[in-house]
Amino acid sequence: MAPFFFLLLFSQILVCTAVDTINSTTPLSGTKKIVSKGNRFALGFYSPPQGNTTAASSSSNYYIAIWYNTISLQTTVWIANTKVPVSDPTTASLAIGTDGNLVLLDQSKNRQLWSTNVSVASNSTVAIIRDTGSLDLIDASNSSIIYWRSIDHPTNTWLPTGKLGLNKASGVSQRLVPWINNANPSPGLFSLELDPNGTTQYFIQWNNSITYWTSGRWNDNIFSLVPEMTAGYNYNFRFVDDAAESYFIYSMKDDSILSRFVIDVNGQIKQLTWVEASQQWILFWSQPRTQCEVYALCGAYGSCNFNALPFCNCIKGFSQKVQSDWDLQDYSGGCKRNVPLQCQTNSSSSQSQLDKFYTMEKVRLPDNAQSAVAKSLQECQVTCLNTCSCNAYTYNSSGCFVWHGDLINLQEQYNGNGPGTLFLRLAASELQGSKKSKKVIVGAVVGGVAAALIVLAIVLYILFQKCRRDRTLRISKTAGGTLIAFRYSDLHHVTNNFSEKLGGGAFGTVFKGKLPDSTAIAVKRLDGFHQGEKQFRAEVSTIGTIQHVNLVRLLGFCSEGSRRLLVYEFMPKGSLELQLFHGETTALSWAARYQIAIGTARGLNYLHEKCRDCIIHCDVKPENILLDESFVPKVSDFGLAKLLGRDFSRVLTTMRGTRGYLAPEWISGVPITAKADVFSYGMMLFELISGRRNADHEEEGKSFFFPNLASNTLHEGDVKILLDPRLNGDANADELTRACKVACWCIQDDESTRPTTGQIVQILEGFLDVNMPPVPRSLKVLDESPDVINFFSDVSSQNSKTQNSTFSSQTKSTTSDG
Ligand SMILES: *[C@@H]1O[C@H](CO)[C@@H](O)[C@H](O)[C@H]1NC(C)=O
Ligand SMILES: *[C@@H]1O[C@H](CO)[C@@H](O)[C@H](O)[C@H]1NC(C)=O
Ligand SMILES: *[C@@H]1O[C@H](CO)[C@@H](O)[C@H](O)[C@H]1NC(C)=O
Ligand SMILES: *[C@@H]1O[C@H](CO)[C@@H](O)[C@H](O)[C@H]1NC(C)=O
Ligand SMILES: *[C@@H]1O[C@H](CO)[C@@H](O)[C@H](O)[C@H]1NC(C)=O
Ligand SMILES: *[C@@H]1O[C@H](CO)[C@@H](O)[C@H](O)[C@H]1NC(C)=O
Ligand SMILES: *[C@@H]1O[C@H](CO)[C@@H](O)[C@H](O)[C@H]1NC(C)=O
Ligand SMILES: *[C@@H]1O[C@H](CO)[C@@H](O)[C@H](O)[C@H]1NC(C)=O
Ligand SMILES: *[C@@H]1O[C@H](CO)[C@@H](O)[C@H](O)[C@H]1NC(C)=O
């Protein structure tokens, strides 16, 4: 209460001293700024924090910008003159021009740098900064006449209550374009916009030409390829598509939460929420999911690796073209050759050697390959050598392919679709190392060393054999209970070269393997770990001590160099996802499902309450429930979120935990508790009942969200209609009702009203009775037609209400700012 009161007082004082308007007699210049009524946003001259800039641009550049006025980290949301900075804000001014437009003037050069550039009917206008973050140009005598709004002309940020769409009459579309680098707001190469052709999907494009991400079409509730929107309970959103325009609009249900949507310098779109406690913007959603899916992110001859920071590196034989740009995270300039190719130089041929090829294995092959005629690898190589513009070739089962010109979109250590082997053309000197200069010495020493080497080799061989025997022994003793530290080469061997893929979990890829004693194992190769060896071992040994009949057992691990692998017991029946969602008939009877529900709750309960530190799973979903020979469920992947650190795991889970298993608190930035797992468990329970994904239900061509139907049906009575049709009504009615009720309690918005996992077990076992659950509030909202979704549910959003012309029914009446 007290801090809130203080805040009120504080903002009162500011309101008295700060102005929120620019009129014809009060232009803005120097360090002056205007601040919105509620103190949320400020507008003034802004200079980006300089990175390591080159001497040429060492003088500061200033831009007219809007930023959050209440947070410690200066964060801009809009920039007027993105392309034309001023060097001295004292000689520049933002003023109402003679034509009524708001203009930026550089008086030292007597030049107009920027203008709102609209036709203004009256001769008296003012510009006002709103609490929505919009700068509005309005009529001085009638503030409901709005000529121009900055929120309709977004730069890299799309704020709540702003539209992003297409005006069908004028053909003008609002595009979100990132800064070119972290120190320069001029437009970069990427952009997000609604399909200009008029479909209801958004595209992210590179250089206005190549689309590397799409949202999928709007299907009345969500964009089809963004299923995680079903978890966006803290947002109101809607898509409007009428004769005049089509656009998407969102707002916060709780107006006190600061949230923004940006397209960042690296071509990803991101939704971020300010968390005051940690004084930073927390990322909870981004697309494309991995940085390397961004087209041409690393420029020509750059290679993307999402396990490394920075993501981009130059490939062998190349180095950064403009280091200062790379320092500012602008990799688009790419890399340049260190040594020119022999064919590019005019040196006499006696001196120079023919170009050579460097083999890059397991890469995502660059774009724009050209097919060439060649019957063998050698021919393919010769074909490439014969043309000076040929920079690389590959030879695969489809034949010979060569690349002329720059290599774009390379990715090393690539695990995705169709990795290939690239033969990269380099000057011969690049591939010789230092051999030549040392030839003489090497020759002299070789004789003496050779004998020693042979002895050494024999010793090593004996030692190696001994180790091998020891290890084999230890491997066969897995039942002993302690974790085994595997060697990478052994795992490589027992998984048969990582050939049998079992699945791709949230944290890495899982492969099947077989130990020397024929025990089947599942080997998880972890992605994206930057953690040190010691910390990894500590965490892993903690996970290793957690043993419960409903938890997948960790048998061992491997930590070598940057490689991190976990070795688990193998589950013959695979995941619940596999058993539940596939096939015309189902192997899972109602009784089996009920036992799976109870077992899973027991496993989670063990994690939540019985371990020394409470472990929140963070990613409960059918993919992570594995089944043994007799369909006993075992929760997998626990402890990994903790391994990754909480904030990071928040990102990971929301990025990858699709299809609405996420509790609303993931989105709102409040601390995550075990009740977040309960929410996901509830969503999963609904799926056990219906046998389908909650979002995959459709009737008479209209899709619906299963939990909605279920919670409404509960109140009306006959729950049998909710049952998976493949079970032909074969289910215990009492158990079915219990399961529905529990599921519905689990997905309540307020986490305190959700049961604990311990209570869930008791209810399902029939030891605890359960009342009729209310229909969760967020489901109610989803149920209503988009038109009546209340965009401003909060009293504190008075200001937004008055300023927002998009919600026309509310706008006209209430503009009395005095
Ligand atoms: C402009 O605003 C200032 C204070 O904000 C006020 O004193 C002045 O009268 C205004 N001028 C006009 C022309 O409205
Ligand atoms: C800038 O360059 C200096 C020296 O070249 C280096 O120490 C510093 O870390 C760099 N700063 C940034 C932000 O890259
Ligand atoms: C202002 O708008 C007109 C059309 O409305 C356009 O032709 C002109 O290029 C614009 N000027 C600037 C500086 O954007
Ligand atoms: C604006 O126009 C009105 C009449 O339309 C006129 O009386 C007034 O003087 C004008 N004001 C300015 C600042 O030009
Ligand atoms: C202000 O403008 C609106 C819209 O153009 C109009 O409906 C209203 O009557 C005007 N109010 C005054 C006081 O002129
Ligand atoms: C838009 O329509 C044009 C003409 O019909 C077509 O050539 C183009 O490929 C379409 N663009 C997209 C992104 O679908
Ligand atoms: C972007 O496209 C334009 C033509 O539309 C082309 O001139 C330019 O070179 C392209 N930029 C890059 C970095 O390829
Ligand atoms: C090679 O020679 C040609 C003409 O003989 C000349 O135009 C070119 O600049 C030379 N290139 C280099 C790298 O010296
Ligand atoms: C062979 O490489 C080319 C060039 O990247 C690629 O388009 C093609 O799909 C590859 N074929 C196979 C079978 O991997």
Image (spheres, rainbow, N blue to C red):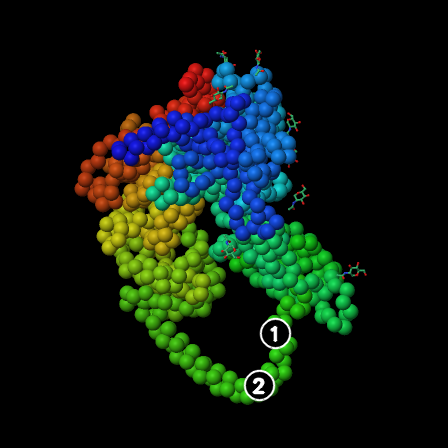
Q: State the image coordinates of residue 97 (x, y, percent, origin top left).
A: 59, 24
Q: Residue 411: in sight, yes or no?
A: no
Query: Which quarter of the image is occupied by the C terminus?
Result: top left
Query: What amino acid is at disc 1?
Result: Ser
Q: Quadrant of residue 492?
A: bottom left
What kind of residue is marked 2? Answer: Val
Which element type, helix, strand or loop, lies under badge 1?
loop
Label count reads 2
Name which residue lies at 32% across and 44% down: 672
* Residue 61 percent coordinates (x, y): 56, 41
For the residue pair 129 and 167, the one nearer the viewer reads as: 129
Residue occupying image coordinates x 64% and y 62%: 338
Q: Would residue 804 appear left or right of 774 to someone viewing this image?
A: right
Image quadrant assignment for residue 250: top left
- Residue designated by label 1: 434
In the rendered image, residue 7, in percent from the top left (x then y), is placed at 33, 32
Q: Mark 1–mark 2 contact, CB under 8 Å?
A: no
Relative placement, left or right, of 783 versus 418 is left
First reached walking from the N terminus: tag 1 or tag 2: 1
Please identify the residue farthest to the left as the structure is shown. 767
Crowd rating for badge 1 (residues with CA inside 10 Å; few <14, some 14–19, many 20+): few
**At which x and y percent is residue 274?**
40, 40
| Residue identifier under label 2 | 445
Q: Is residue 643 visible?
A: yes
Spatial CA span between label 1 and label 2: 16 Å
- Foreground residue, 752 or 582? 752
Task: Decide which of 773, 328 is in the foreground and name it.
Answer: 328
